[in-house]
Amino acid sequence: MNRFEGRDDLFQFLTSRFRAITEREGIDSDAVDICAKTLTVREAIGDTKRRDFPIITGKEVVIEADYRGTKGQAFTDAPSDFRGTLREITELDFRHDLHAPGLFVATLNAVMSSLGLAGSAIHCRDEGPELCAAALADRIEKDHRPRRVLLIGYQPAMLQRLSEKFELRVFDLNEMNIGTVHHGVEIEDGNASMSRDWLNDWPDILLVTGSTLCNGTLIHFLDLEKPTYFYGMTIAGAAPLLGLKRLCFADRF
């Protein structure tokens, strides 16, 4: 059973928790400028040999919030600039404003990282994604020794490393990826019905992109019986508020 009825319920919870933190820290009404900007590929990921990362080929772009010099990023398909206070960010209209989720998540990531309540909230650069994928595959092999792994979100470096070690299925929402085959694995339609019974039955472990936060599909991967980990910078600030396990190896390189 999902603990949230939908995306609106999820963001209501997150904004409430975030507001409590900013009020506790005495920063909710500060005259803080929050700027979000769409990053170029080079700004977001640097120089990488692989050219099929979603950040390069996908429809979503990366926006970046700057809070007191600390950066926080988020993937979104509705980028926008914003300048205002932290309280104003929590008062955005998440039901009707398409820009609100991305702006809030980027800001949440920047502030939580600034306060030391979250880990790295920016995208790996240069060879970082390749190193992260290798570390992730090694970690779950060591800790769980799974036979079947479910990857939610097409992440090519992770797909390659995981497919070398485990039986792998990958689901994605980008129609440009659906049906394509990479390292012997076909990318399946993320809009297909994945019942909680199936999610608790087929995979031994789930790896879920943090981008599911902005589009609201994250609620389908909460409180499952199987070990579930979230990856990517978008989930950085929300993970501790939701009690989610996040895998990030940015501190290694």
Image (tube, helix red, strand yellow):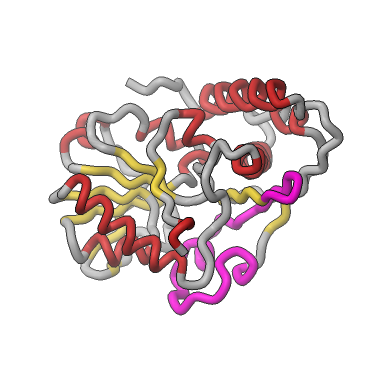
Position of residue 185 in the picture relative to residue 87 (left or right): left
Q: Is residue 141 magenta?
A: no
The answer to whether residue 223 is seen in the rendering is yes
Q: Where 228 sits versus 88, above or below?
A: below
Q: Position of residue 190 (x, y in %)?
A: 36, 47
In magenta, the rendered stretch is 41-70
**Residue 43 belongs to the span the image colors magenta:** yes
x 63%, y 37%: residue: 115
Residue 217 screen position, x and y as percent: 44, 37
Q: Depth check: give the residue in front, 46 or 193.
A: 46
Vertical placement of 237 versus 93: above or below? below
The image quarter containing residue 2 is top left
Can you see residue 203?
A: no
Q: Residue furthest left?
A: 147
Q: Quadrant of the N terminus?
A: top left
252, 44: nearer the viewer: 252
